[in-house]
Structures are given as C-alpha cells and as structure tokens.
Image (cartoon, rainbow, N blue to C red):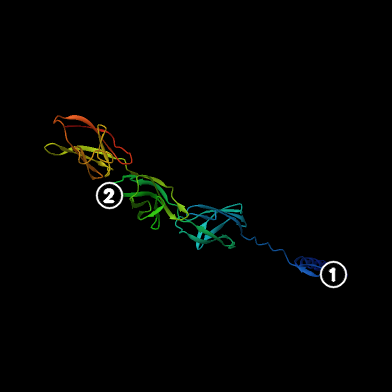
Amino acid sequence: MLLTSIRIFVFLFCFSLLCEAYAAERPKRINGVAVPKSVPAIVPVTVLSIIPAQAEPGSMVTLSGSGFGENATVFLGSVEVPVRITASRQAEFNIPPQLEAGLYALYLKRSDGMIGRSYNFTVLPLRPILSSLQPAMISSCAVGKEREVIARGKNFGNTSMLFFDGATLTATFLSPESISFNVPTVPGGLHQVLVKNASENSSVPLTFVVETRPEIGQVTVGNEHVNLYELIISGRNFNQNSSLYVDGVQIGGRGGQDMAEREKLIYVDCTKLIYQRHPFSPVNKDFRLQVVNTGGEGSQVITVTAP
C-alpha cells in the first residue's frame, strides 16, 4: 500500500513538471489570443544626406544616415566602391579616378545584403589645370610656327576646349598634359587663355602677351651710293608708319620728313627698316637712333658710329 502511494506521488510530480515545461513553450495568450515569441526588427538602410551631390573623380563623398552597419559598400551604377563606416551613421568614399562623367544611381548595400534607396549622383568631368604657356609672349609680327603656343597642365582630353579672350580657339590635343594652339591676329597687350572640359568647370586663366613695342636688334651698313648710303635696322615689331629718330630728329612716319626730302626711312617688313642717310662728311661720328611706332611705343636708344 505504501509503495503504491509513493508511485502515485512520483507520477503526479513528474506530470506537473512536464506540464510546466509544455506551458513554457506554448505561446502565451492574452484574452484568448496567442502571442508569438519576439523577432528582432530589421533595421533599414537610411540615407539622409549626400555631400556633395556632385563631384569629380577622385573627390571624397560623405553619406549621413542610419542603419549602415559595420561593413557596407556603395554602388555608382554597377561600379562597387568601398566605404569607410563611422558609428553606423556616416559613410565616406572616393569616386574612382577612372569613372567617366555622367549621371549615376547611387545606393548603399549593407554586409547582410540590405540595400538602401537609390539616389541620382552626378560625376563631373575632371577640372583641367593650366599651369604654363610656352612661350607666354610673342611678337605681334610673329608668323607661322612662331605663333604656335603649347598650353601645359593636366586633366586635358580630346574634348577639352581652349579659350582665347573668351572665344573658342581651334586647338590640338597632344596629351593629358599638353594642348597646342596658334595665336590669332589680335591687338598687342595682355590676353587670357583658359581650358574647359565642360561648361561648368574651367582652369584658372593665364595671361598671354602680344608684344608690340619695337626693338632694335642690330644696325648694319647696306648699299653705298655716291651721295648716300643705307643703314639696315633689324629687329621686330616695326610697322609701316614707324618713325626713326636720329639724334631727336624724326625721319619718316606720320609727321616726319617727307619721302622726297634728303633723309628717307623705308619700311621693308616688321623686322627690317632701311634708313637712307646723306652724310655731310665721310668721317665717322656717333649718333643715336630710336624707332617709335604710331602708338607711341619706342625702342631702346642705341648709338651708331658711321658717316
């Protein structure tokens, strides 16, 4: 009898334990409705800002938001770009240098496969850099190859445009570091040269000089006649109305002595003038020469020893 009572007690005790275990695994009911076990919520990828909204290749872009996780990548179209994550709220990446200019779909993909919303992002053409012009100055009477200039810098391309005083100029692409062009016929003085890869970006302009000031290179004796001889004045930037001052006396040009008078100045081209001189004596003497153009620009004064 005692053994039977013990068996019944053990059975009831074990049965109660099984019931408690079963009850612990069953969903709880509130007002007759089963409440399932809690499931961790999936945190979405949220981008609140993209700074800047457009940039050149190589530039850094910062995304701010939430749910970035510890590891993620950014996509620009089909191009995957690694990012640096800070506290799951900020992602930084650099636009690949080889990426072509254009409009791309930008989105962030978390390491668990979660993808955020897509945004439009513009990759700008590389901004050209103009560092030097070789040469940076030419004579106004330069011709042919003398008027060729090479613009040096970087980020030039086949579609780069060269501007001279704000007007597009035909140029030849030589390499990403150089473009050549011919200086147009323009007035003397200062001019501006710049390069553009697109309408919204351009290089810093550089100054180019077209020199008009006359310059005497050398004076030599030319043909000799019975009562006169020629002095050949070589140099640059002479013009048809240039005057020659001999010891302060104007010969030729506007307001100078008439061509029919004793002393004459003959314009050959912008690099040569011929001064026909009638000496009073065959004995050499020193006198000073200066060429002055119509705008008032004068050459250096040189001393010549001749009859």
Viewer-proximal residue among 88 and 180: 180
Viewer-proximal residue among 129 and 252: 252
For the N terminus, the quadrant is bottom right
Residue 131 image point, x, y percent: 40, 46
Residue 276 falls left or right of residue 33: left
Residue at 28% over, 50% down: 145
Task: Say which mark, if any, is on residue 31.
Answer: none
Viewer-proximal residue among 161 and 274: 274
For the C terminus, the quadrant is top left
Query: Label 2 belongs to which residue?
Result: 143
The amino acid type of the residue labelled 2 equals Val
Task: Tell me where residue 49 sits by quadrant.
Answer: bottom right
Total residue callouts: 2
| 277 relative to 101, above or below | above
Mark 2 vs mark 1, foreground winner is: 2
| 159 relative to 5, above or below | above
Task: Tell me where residue 263 sits by quadrant.
Answer: top left
Residue 59 falls left or right of residue 219: right
Q: Secondary structure at mark 1?
A: helix
The amino acid type of the residue labelled 1 equals Ile
| 285 relative to 124, above or below | above
| 266 relative to 57, above or below | above
Outermost residue, left direction? Answer: 226
Residue at 56% over, 58% down: 72
Residue 119 image point, x, y percent: 56, 61
Residue 188 image point, x, y percent: 34, 45
Query: Label 1 belongs to which residue?
Result: 8
Q: Secondary structure at mark 2?
A: loop
Residue 232 image point, x, y percent: 20, 39
Residue at 85% over, 70% down: 4
Distance from Cα at disc 2 to Cα at disc 1: 123 Å
Q: Counting other residues with Cα less than 10 Å from the Cα at mark 2, is it few (<14), some (14-19), or many (20 or more)?
A: few
